[in-house]
Image (tube, grey):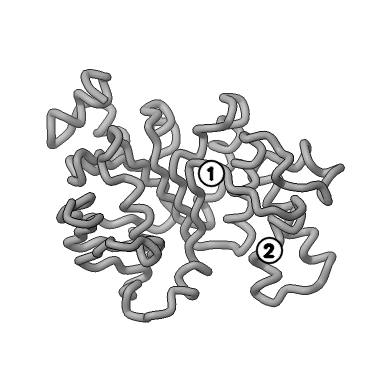
Amino acid sequence: MKKKIEIQNLHVSHGSKWAVENLNFDVYENEILAIIGPANAGKSTLLKSINRMTDFSDGTRVKGTIKLDGEDIHAFADSTWLRQKIGMVSPLPVGLPMSIIDNVTYAPRMAGMKDKITLMERAEDCLRKAALWDEVKDRLDGLATKLSGGQQQRLTIARALSHRPEVLLLDEFSIAIDPVTTMKIEDVLLELKKDMTIVCVTNVIHQARRLGDRTAMMLEGHLLDIDSNQRIFSGQVNDRRTHDYIEGVFG
């Protein structure tokens, strides 16, 4: 399998505390990698590092190497090219203070897309993929901030898809979404992996089992295990703590 992301000797600190220590693993093209682990395991910090969101955190230091398609993501001072290739969905919904349609078409418009028909087609496609189209198609000009929490979360997914990323990072995307809609989006993600690579942080063990081709277990900034779902969820793990977390012994 082709390596899409390579993480080598990654350390990330917030002030004097290491949030992530000595991570070494690869993410393969067109796979869904689920990342599990309790709070403060370093999962969100890892995602932010892949997207270079750590650049905007005062006091954060990053050591080690992250490569996308074999290219060091820190090789260039300007990270604009990276954000065109990687979409990010945060755990809490952040609807921009503008209309629903303007939210979804914001990135394409900033990239120079001006044709209204093309923009509308892009918006509909992304909203359908985020399982939101049927609920908002008659009020696209309405304020996005008027949507419910679950709807705003799905809107952030649509917005992340709008610039056609090669990699999609999701941090607890289902935290504010009802189970039925969550299942719809999971089905969409399984379709999306045909065209992109997905890294999904989740605290829901069953979601990792359903979605992942592989699952990684993190604890206190360290990677305990990473393997196929078949092995991870059948107890064939390198670290007993992975098995204990999956079985609910702690976490």
* 29 and 157: which is toward the camera: 157
Secondary structure beneath dot 1 equals helix
* 153 and 126: which is toward the camera: 153
Picture quadrant where residue 108 is located: bottom right
Total marks drawn?
2
Residue placed at 80% from the left, 59% from the top? 120
Residue carrying label 2:
106
- Judge left or right: residue 147 versus residue 40: right
- Judge left or right: residue 139 versus residue 32: right
Residue carrying label 1:
189
Q: What type is the residue that disc 2 sits on?
A: Tyr
Extreme residue in the right direction = 138
Image spot of residue 163 (x, y percent): 61, 64
Instruction: Kindly check if marks 2 and 1 are in contact, taking CB atoms under 8 A apart as contact.
Output: no
Image spot of residue 136 (x, y percent): 78, 41
- Judge left or right: residue 81 versus residue 20: right
Secondary structure beneath dot 2 equals helix
- Judge left or right: residue 93 versus residue 201: right
Image spot of residue 161 (x, y percent): 60, 56
- Figure quadrant of the C terminus: top left
Q: Earlier in the sequence, mark 2 or mark 1?
A: 2
Disc 2/disc 1 C-alpha distance (Å): 22 Å
Image spot of residue 107 (x, y percent): 64, 65
Q: What type is the residue that disc 1 sits on?
A: Leu
Residue placed at 20% from the left, 26% from the top? 243
Q: In this view, does 217 lie above or below 96?
A: above
Of labels 2 and 1, the one closer to you: 2
Residue placed at 48% from the left, 42% from the top? 91
Q: In this view, does 166 lie above or below 71?
A: above
Q: Residue 44 carries which label?
A: none
Mark 1 closeness class: few <14, some 14–19, many ≥20 residues within 10 Å = many
Q: In this view, does 76 lie above or below 106?
A: below
